[in-house]
Structures are given as structure tokens and as C-alpha cells.
Amino acid sequence: MFLMASWSGNYQGITIKGTVIDAGSKSSLAGVKVLEKGTPNQVFTDKTGSYEIIVQGSQSRLLFSLSGFKPQEVIVGTKEFIHVSLAQVMKKDDLVVDEIKPLEQPEDRAAKRDMMGHGALGTKAYNAAYMSGEEQVIVQQFNTEDYSPITENIFHRALNNPLSTFAIDVDAASYSNIRRFITNGQLPPKDAVRIEEMINYFHYDYPQPDGSDPFSINTEVATCPWDSEHLLVHIGLQGKRIPVQNLWPSNLVFLIDVSGSMDTPNKLPLLKSAFSLLVNELRPQDRIAIVVYAGAAGLVLPSTSGDQKEKINTALNQLQAGGSTAGGQGIILAYKIAQENLMKEGNNRIILATDGDFNIGASSNGEMERLIEEKRQTGIFLTVLGFGMGNYKDSKMEILADKGNGNYAYIDNILEAKKVLVNEFGGTLFTIAKDVKIQVEFNPGVVQSYRLVGYENRKLNDEDFNNDKKDAGELGSGHTVTAIYEIIPVGVEDKTNSGVDPLKYQDNQPKIIRNSSEILTVKLRYKAPDGDVSKLTSHIVKNEAKDPERASENLRFSSSVAAFGMLLRDSEFKGNMNYDMVLQLAKSAKGKDEEGYRAEFIRLVESAKLMVKI
């Protein structure tokens, strides 16, 4: 379906059709704006990159534009079909463009410099100004991105600590953020690397559930690629995939940051294109409202039926950035609108799109957490979409999504928007199980020590597993969740210093171990999306380790992603792993890769390898 902005020129003209692709990857580009210059007449390409537009005549000029790509202008002439390839542009990660204004005359610059010395940018920002053609671009050379510190999980002795408990994580923001850094020519900060989100960015070939639980549990054991004396245990969940036409109706509220910090091409313009893709997926039974916030919060579009796509997109296209960031006020208003239009038998969700830079109102993490925790009790979930760079607040974004019973994605380009909002529409917006917790009990007769790879900020106390008041992760329609444990078997020398001194008041003799054919048991608790009481299910894993060449593509590819994350973090647990080994492992497990995500991963590893050598 093609999206036409508001335009009253209902005349007989020339119909032009075509497609737009990425000049580099040759893949289709969705959300490209096709504008007839000199008129308000514009459409956007659909998820296949196709468009159709009626223009005034052969002298009309079409402008094709998309954030992150060089715009292209074409004269219609006698053509009926116009196909366009757009080339990507490089972005500088540490620059935040504040404004573009006409080039000043030399005599004006001293006064301007003095004035700016007392302003928000200051003399340093003025001295960082650079000239581009007939424009002067004032730039802030400050990178204030914020990431929560990560302390890697260590090895634990199974005899002393047989239980490992954590909440699932379906977020994938870390991977697309890492991709942004590497694509722009630099390695990411260590704390931006959350290995579980890298692993869970990819889909794995798990079977659909065939029982009463809304997910299947899949396990596998094989030799560890970075230490041949160790083992890897691969645990995968596959959420039940519900056809889009069978998904329950949605009451959505777009909560959009239109503050001044969003006024760069990879923020508000990309956000508009991304949300246009989601609007395309809405059905007549769905409803959507738009709330914005800057210096204050306001309602731009009241709750509107999903079949009024032109009206919704017109409201989106009219948004402009400016002002400060009243994030707290915006969230309060968004919940109010969602509550007024609550669907008792539907999916009620706020989709917050921002760079995370809240600075007015309920701005501290603690205040925002309490606000979101209070509002989630109404049955309205919160999805967070992050945009931009330079002042990006990853730590705050992740907290909001976790506390809002939602998920968190980082949108670095229009293809990622398509992945999150079109390809994974059901998983992003429709929860099939909430407060999903995993508890693994290791058999100390087989397992000497173990380490959970990633999930550092998802760990729970063992007693939290049976506590239904403890919040955990949510699983969406069709989502996969993967976790990896590295295991040191009994009889192998433990070089990790994971032991403890002998106990003084207890018997230090080994306990009687039962069921030596079992390596561990996986237990899961989850609630229905509208439930308050959890259900329990369990799965036994046999002590049957596979040789590396016999391991599944699921295990080999996920372990290559985990290894890449450890290299980016320079982990003390990376063993003998190097970039060549990661590439070999990933290439051997590329599989069908219909969307090209695994091929892209291989290219990222190759790029990172070159950066490390420089």
C-alpha cells in the first residue's frame, strides 16, 4: 500500500511506477520519500521498495530521499517506470550537527564568536565550526553517549552453586548499535557490547511448540570452540508464531521525541520513515494515537483507525524538532491516551521513539523506573525504539523497556526499521508470555564449573524464580531466545580460580550425586500476558556432547556471535579465540540466510578484524 501525503491537487496526470534499491547491497529500500518537486505531492516506497505516484507532466522532477542515503533527482520525461539506486553516505559518529545556517561574512564572525561564548555551545563549539559549500555547519564535538557498566559473569563451582537463574532477554538493540559503530569505522565501547542481545538478534531454526506451553525448549551440548577441554550448552526457546491476521487488535500510542536533539537526519527523519512502515502494517481493527514531547507534551493525533493511513502519515510528516526534552510529561500523557482507548481483549502498547536524552521532569533513572512500573500494572506495555548517536542514552532506554514489560531496539537505518516493525511485527508488538524466567540446575557429578555467557543485567536471585511478584522478560509472537553456558567438566583442570576455601563448620566431602547421565535440568516459569500466576515447565539435558563438526548450525552460529562479543569486550574468558576463528565458525553455519543478516555479520567481523590490525 502506498502512502500519499495530504494534497488537494486531484488532476489527471502521468502515473509513474518503480522501485528503489540500495546501490551497495542491491536490496529493496522501504520508506523512501518520492517527492514531486515544487508540490506537496509525495509517496513512500513500500516494504518491497515499490512506489506509484501521479505527477503533473513530463517536466516534473522526482526527488528520492531517505535518511542515510544520498538523495537523487530524476526528470520524468517520457518514462512510465523509474527505477532508482540510492548510495549510502558515511556519518561521523562523534559529531552532532546542531544547526545549518547561511555562511557569515568575515566581519560578522567576531561578534558571533563573542555571543556564542555566552551561549549553549560556547567558544569551543564555535571554533569547531567548519565550512561546507555556501553553508556553515556548527558542530558539537562532544560524545555524551551513556552505557551501563557490565561486569562479566564468572565461573561458579557447581558443587557450591548448583543453580543459575536469569530473566530472558529478547532485546537486540546492542547488536544494531555495534553495527553502527563498526560501519562508521570504529570499534564500540566495551559496555555497549551485551552479548545476549547480539546472539538474540538472529533467528535460529527451532521447532514450533506442539504442547500447551507457548514456546518450545531446545537444548544441545557440544565442544567449546575457544577451549577444546570445555563444553557449551545451548538453550533455545521458540515462541509460538501467530499469523498476523489472527493477532488480537492493537491500541497503540506513538510517543515521539521532537526535542532539538532529534533534529539530525538519523533521528527524526529516519523515525518518520520507520513509523510509516509500521503504519503500512496496521489493520482496520487497530487504532493509533500520536503524542509528542519537547518543551512540553501534546497530542498530535487522537486515536485513529488503522485503515486511515493517509491521515496518520500526514500527522507524522508534519512533525518538526525543537525545544528541550519533557520526557516524563510525554510518558504520562501517552499512558493517559492509551488508558482512554484501552482494549480489554487487545494489545495495548506505547511505542516510545527517542535518543533517550530526557532532561526535564521525571528525568532520573529511579523516577522513570517507578513511573513505568506503576503504569505497567494497567496492562499497557512499553516498547522503546532508539535513534541517533553522539548523545545517545542507551542505559536509560534499556531501563524503560525492561520496566515497561516491553522490548528495546536500536534503529540505525531503514532496513533495521523494516526488520523490527515489519518482518518481526508480531514479536515486537504482541506478547505471548510475560515474566519468563529460566533456572538451570547443574549436576555436580558431571559439571565442575559453569559460566553463563552474557545476561549480566538479567541475573536473578535463586529465590526469585518462584516469586511471582518478581518482574522478568517478555516473549513475543515468533520470537526466539538463546542462552549459552560454558562448562568445565569434572576431571578437567579448572584454571579459572573459581574455587573457594574449605568450609570450617560443614563436611567438605563430595555429596552423593544422582543421575550421572544428566548434565543439567532447565526449568522455566512464565505467565500469560494477562495473568498473575506463573506456570512451571522443565527440560532435562543429557550428558551427550557432540564433536564441533556435528553440532547444529544453531549452536555453531550462536557461539560465533558470542565469541565475537567476547573479542570486542577483550574478555578474559575468550580463550584461544581470534577473528579468523570467528569467521570460519560463522561461515560454516551461515545456512539459508534468506534476509542476509548472517552474511552482514560476517562482513562486520571482517571489518572489525581490519580495525584491530590498524
Image (spheres, rainbow, N blue to C red):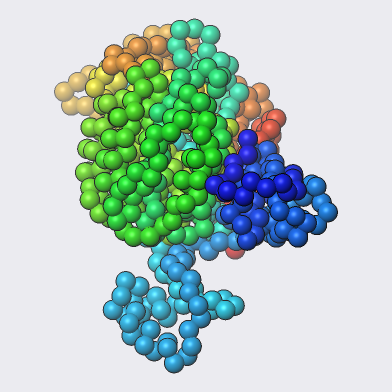
- Give me the residue at 45% from left, 69% from top: 99
Q: Residue furthest left?
A: 505
- Give me the residue at 61% from left, 23% from top: 205
- Give me the residue at 48% from left, 16% from top: 215
Residue 297 visible, this orientation:
yes
Residue 438 visible, this orientation:
no
Where the C terminus falls, by quadrant? Answer: bottom right
Q: Residue furthest bottom?
A: 107
- Give me the residue at 33% from left, 25% from top: 342
Q: Nearer the viewer, residue 234 or 196?
A: 196
- Is residue 21 shown above or below 283? below
- Is residue 108 shown above or below 155? below
Where the N terminus falls, by quadrant? Answer: top right
**Residue 218 x, y percent position in the rendering:** 52, 18
Q: Nearer the viewer, residue 408 or 334?
A: 334
**Residue 27 x, y percent position in the rendering:** 70, 43
From the viewer's perspective, is 388 left or right of 441?
A: right
**Residue 79 x, y percent position in the rendering:** 82, 51
Figure disc tally: 0
Q: Residue furthest right?
A: 78
From the viewer's perspective, is 405 left or right of 215?
A: left
From the viewer's perspective, is 110 left or right of 482?
A: left
- Is residue 6 shown above or below 508? below
**Residue 244 x, y percent position in the rendering:** 55, 22
From the viewer's perspective, is 209 left or right of 403?
A: right
